[in-house]
Amino acid sequence: MTCSAGAIIQMISVNNSNTYEQICSGILCFGDSDWWYHNRGHMDMQLMKRYAGFTRVLYVNSVMVRKFNIGEGGMFVRRVRRKLRSIMRGIKPSGIGNMAIYSPFSMPVHHIHLAKQLNALVLRMQIRRCLNKLNMEKPLIWVTCPGAAKTAVRLPRTKLVYQRSDVYERLAGVDGDQIKRYDRLLKENADLVIYVSRELMACEKGQCRRALFLDHGVDYELFAGAERSRYVPDEMKQIHHPIAGFYGNIDEHTFDISLVEKLCDLLSDFSIVLIGNSSIDLSALARRKNVCLIGQRPYEQIPYYARCFDVCLMPWRQNEWISACNPIKLKEYLALGKPVVSTPFAELENYKDVVSIASDAESFAEAVDGACDENGPEKVRFRRRRVCNSTWDAKAQEVLRALQEIN
């Protein structure tokens, strides 16, 4: 991990000892993903990795918010098994700084009144036990998953930070009305609400005590530095160029699979490479001759796969979830120096000089085809310059500066 814990600790000690004391009492982070099974590029994970360089951090894997859906068949069974394995780990060191990981037992019963009250009580008891074990009496509490709202607001704390990076109420399979209530509860109690979407922040900042727009960061050295390596993953060696590629979770509410199927026909001379876990059926794509499906790979290896792409893809669905998004992979793609083609979303307007935007399959395919000629050294340098200062170290300090201004 390349993070400037020393620079961060120096900044908060010199500028505001109060903030230093708040942070160094520890951080309890209710994350939006499972540390053991998901890509670790998410904002909450990236920031906690940096803060763990000088204080204790307890990262709590995502509290379940989706209702059980046995109709998912094999996917349902896989999710349950994975969650049970995660819970059975107990409290484990992350291997990064002074950060521990914990998966609590919880049930997706937020739509059932009495059950959700009991669920919140059981969750609170588990977290209190962990805090006692780690000697964290009054931590700064950071919430990304709104399902933890009832627990978070009732725990002793120095400050409460709510990371509103996704519109969870629009997630398929959740009780949208209940998630909205959790969202309001967090906004009412949070000392700081962090937004990654300017548009969403403009709509909601009147509901917050203090709102901060925090554009996503990038692990710049990891991605830009991949160019200096000769290593090529075995799976990529046999794939013919040009390659149009995507990495990340392939989910129903984000990934436009019908668009990608059309692109496979329109870009028959391209290899379409998809890297990551999928929660949807990709069997039809797998049968296509110009498609290569690669499963999830460790975060640290992703740059070596993606550096083989000629064009990077962001084929998002057009819905309210995507409208409020700000994908981290955009900056990662740019740090690699690669041309990017994406369907539109609000935050992309700030990167129109380095991204091609297309709304339908035909214009998307045309943009991908044209982007292959934009891999010259000047273009590569220009894309990297757009994100070279947007490091996660800088974002970590930006949050601390905002906390300093809170009485």
Image: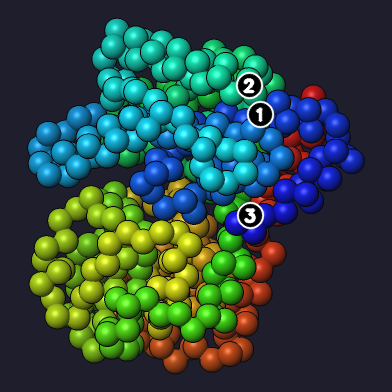
Identify the amino acid type marked 1: Gly
Q: Residue at horizontal 22%, vertical 35%?
A: 80
- Label 3, secondary structure: give it: helix
Compare residues 308 and 301 and report the one nearer the observer: 301
Callout 1 touching callout 2 (CB < 8 Å)? yes
Residue 142 x/y as whole percent: 57, 31
The amino acid sitting under disc 2 is: Met
Q: At 10% across and 72% down in the image, what residue appears?
A: 287
Residue 113 occupies which quadrant of the picture?
top left
Q: Amino acid at mark 3?
A: Trp
Q: Which mark is residue 392?
A: 3
- Compared to residue 206, the image places residue 252 above or below, namely below
Label 2 Cα crowd, 10 Å radius (few <14 / some 14-19 / many 20+):
many
| Distance from Cα at disc 2 to Cα at disc 3 | 25 Å
As drawn, 196 above or below 184: below
The numbered mark, 1 or 3, whose residue comes first in the sequence reads 1
Percent of width and height locating residue 45? 53, 45
Label whose residue precedes the other's in the sequence (2 or 3)? 2
Q: Residue furthest toward the right?
A: 14
Q: Nearer the viewer, mark 2 or mark 3?
A: 2
Residue 285 visible in the displayed image:
yes
Instruction: Quadrant for the C terminus, please.
Output: top right
Give the image location of residue 69, x and y in percent. 16, 33
Q: Residue at x 27, y 85 (%)?
A: 238
Please tell me in which quadrant of the rendered image residue 63 appears. top left
Tell me the quarter of the picture where residue 224 sits. Answer: bottom right
Q: CA distance from mark 1 to mark 3?
A: 19 Å
Q: Is residue 390 above or below residue 17?
A: below
Report which residue position mark 1 lands on: 26
Residue 136: give its label. 2
